[in-house]
Amino acid sequence: MQKQPARLYGLIGFPLGHSFSQDYFNKMFESEGIDAKYINFELPDIGDLNEAIAQYPNLCGLNVTIPYKEQVIPYMDEMDPVAARIGAVNVIKFIGSGASLKLKGFNSDVIGFSQSIAPLLNDSRRKALVLGTGGASKAVCCALEDLGVETQLVSRSPRPGVITYADITPAIIADHKVIVNTTPLGMYPNVDSCPQIPYSDLTPQHLCYDLLYNPDTTLFMRKAAEHGAETKNGLEMLLLQAFAAWQIWNE
C-alpha cells in the first residue's frame, strides 16, 4: 500500500482541465524533498467543499479558482484583510485540525498581479480598463489602485460604476493606456474568442495584459500586438501567486 504524504494541498474549481497548479506544486515538492502532495478537487458545486475536506484529514491548504473565488467566502471562519477588501479568496489556510479546524481566506492573486505588472507601468499608464467583474477582476482592481492606477470595470451588462463593451469609444481607449483581460475569453480550448474591444484604436503606448496563460499568446494579445501594443500573459502572475500561496500556508 502506498504511503500517504505527511501534508496534502489541493485546488478547488470547476472545470480544472486548464490548471497548472498541480504540476507546479508536485514538481516543487519533489525537487525540494518535501513530504507533500497536491491534488485537484473538481467540485461541480461549492456545497461539496466540506465533504471533500472531511475525506482528507492531512489537508493543509487549498487554492481556489474559477468559479469559486467568491462563492467560497461563506465557508471561511476568518478572512485576511486584503481578501476581505477584495471580496475574493484564492488561497485557504487550514488552521488546527479535527473538530477545531478553522479555514482562513487569503488572496495571493493581488500579490502576483501587482509584482508582475508594476515594472510595466509608467507615467502615461495611470488609467486601466479591467475587462470582467469576477473574483480575479477584484484582485486586479485592488492591485492597480494600490499602484496608483485608476480603474474602470467593463462588463457585458451595465450597472453603477461598470461600463459595457459597447460603451468603449476611441476616446476611452486613448485615455486608458492599460487594458487587463480577466475574463476566460480566449482560454484553451476556446482559443478563437476574445473580448470585443476596438483593437484598431490601440497604440504602442498601450499595455494589454491577459490573465490567461494557456495559450501563451491569446487572440486578445495577438490583436493588440498587431496595433503595436505591449502585451503580457498571466504566467508570471501565476508563478508569483503560487509562491505567495506556499508562503501563506507555511508562515
Image (cartoon, rainbow, N blue to C red):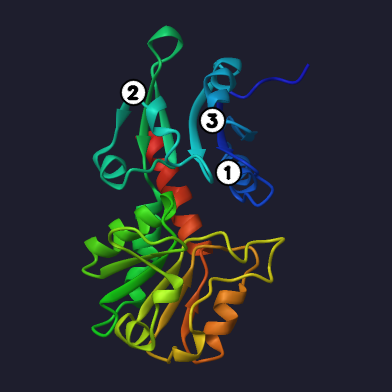
Marks 1/3 in contact by CB < 8 Å: the verdict is no
| Circle 2 residues within 10 Å: few <14, some 14–19, many ≥20 | few
Q: Position of residue 241 (x, y in %)?
A: 44, 52
Looking at this rendering, what residue extends furthest in the top direction?
A: 99
Viewer-side residue, 152 vs 156: 156
Sequence-first disc among 1 and 2: 1
Find disc 3 in the rendering and name its residue: 46
Marks 1/2 in contact by CB < 8 Å: the verdict is no
Find disc 1 in the rendering and name its residue: 25
Find disc 2 in the rendering and name its residue: 77
Q: Residue at x 52, y 44 (%)?
A: 65
Task: Give the amino acid at mark 2.
Answer: Asp
Q: Residue at x 44, y 52 (%)?
A: 134
Would you place residue 224 above or below residue 183 in this image?
Answer: below
| Circle 1 residues within 10 Å: few <14, some 14–19, many ≥20 | many
Rounded to the nearest angstrom, the CA distance separating label 3 from label 2 is 16 Å
Task: Give the amino acid at mark 3.
Answer: Ile
Q: Residue at x 56, y 59 (%)?
A: 184
| Quadrant where the N terminus is found in the figure | top right
Q: Residue 50's mark?
A: none
Q: Position of residue 242 (x, y in %)?
A: 48, 49
Would you place residue 232 above or below residue 70 in this image?
Answer: below
User: Mark 1: which secondary structure?
Assistant: helix
Rounded to the nearest angstrom, the CA distance separating label 1 from label 3 is 23 Å
Rounded to the nearest angstrom, the CA distance separating label 1 from label 2 is 26 Å
Would you place residue 183 above or below residue 119 in this image?
Answer: above
Sequence-first disc among 3 and 2: 3
* Camera-side mark, 1 or 3: 3
User: Mark 3: which secondary structure?
Assistant: helix
Sequence-first disc among 1 and 3: 1
Q: Quadrant of residue 222?
A: bottom right
